[in-house]
Amino acid sequence: MNNEMAYQVFSINSDPRLAYLEDVSANVPDYMQLTDGVRLKGSIPESTTFTLSEEGGDMLCDFVENTSGTLIVSTRAREALEAEGITGDDFEYLPVTLKDKRGRALKSRFYIVNPLQKVECMDRERSKFSAYEDEILSVQRLVVRQEQVPAESKLFRLGEQPRVIVIRSDLVKRIQEAQLTGLFVVGPGEKFTW
């Protein structure tokens, strides 16, 4: 049981200064598998390219904002995540290239982070969600049943709706201490968008 840890959820940041991607789903074969936390190494080519939206701002962050709810990070963010144990069989780092608004490839390398671990831990009484029969269609507010989360799990997909990526508060703090930019999360029970 892991009562001292709080869990947060990745959400879309609406800051107009941020550069963002809106072509992720169009450029990833079987995009729905990516949001389901299915192993994709080998099926997403290293030549996969995303272009920064002309509608977005000019501030490119370590956690790259996008309209698909995909976790895309800089090399610097990947290294920080790996230093915190976000490695091994429960994660994939899939290399991608980003292009600027003019279509020129950026020199820096970026990665899709694909968490493969799914943990069924949603407190259905305190969370807000839409369902059809027993299937969770979307989640608007999440409260995690902490006793359901393995003690070592810092970053994982919500088992009831794998598109939702959950992060433990101590990992959020480490990311902030490393001065990585662009991380936007909401706390337990807060409304989020993905």
Image (tube, rainbow, N blue to C red):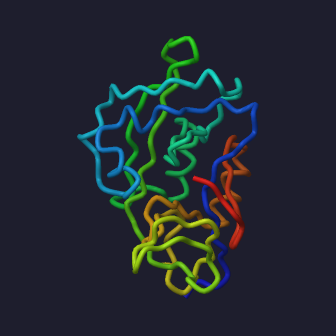
- Residue in the picture at 61% in, 67% down: 168
From the viewer's perspective, tell me whether residue 139 is left or right of residue 160.
Answer: right
Q: Which of 139 and 155 is in front in this view?
A: 139
- Residue in the picture at 33% in, 59% down: 89
Q: Which of 169 and 133 is in front in this view?
A: 133
Quadrant where the image shows the N terminus: bottom right
From the viewer's perspective, tell me whether residue 11 is left or right of residue 94.
Answer: right
Quadrant housing residue 102: top right
Against 138, residue 57 (above or below) is above
Q: Which of 88 and 167 is in front in this view?
A: 167
Q: Name the spot of residue 182 as percent of width and height, x first.
A: 68, 42
From the viewer's perspective, tell me whether residue 161 is left or right of residue 43.
Answer: right
- Residue in the picture at 68% in, 51% down: 184
Q: Name the spot of residue 120 as percent of width and height, x first.
A: 44, 77
From the viewer's perspective, tell me whether residue 179 is left or right of residue 71.
Answer: right
Q: Name the spot of residue 26 as percent of width and height, x first.
A: 39, 33
Quadrant housing residue 129: bottom right
- Residue in the picture at 50% in, 23% down: 51
Q: Name the spot of residue 71 as percent of width and height, x first.
A: 51, 47
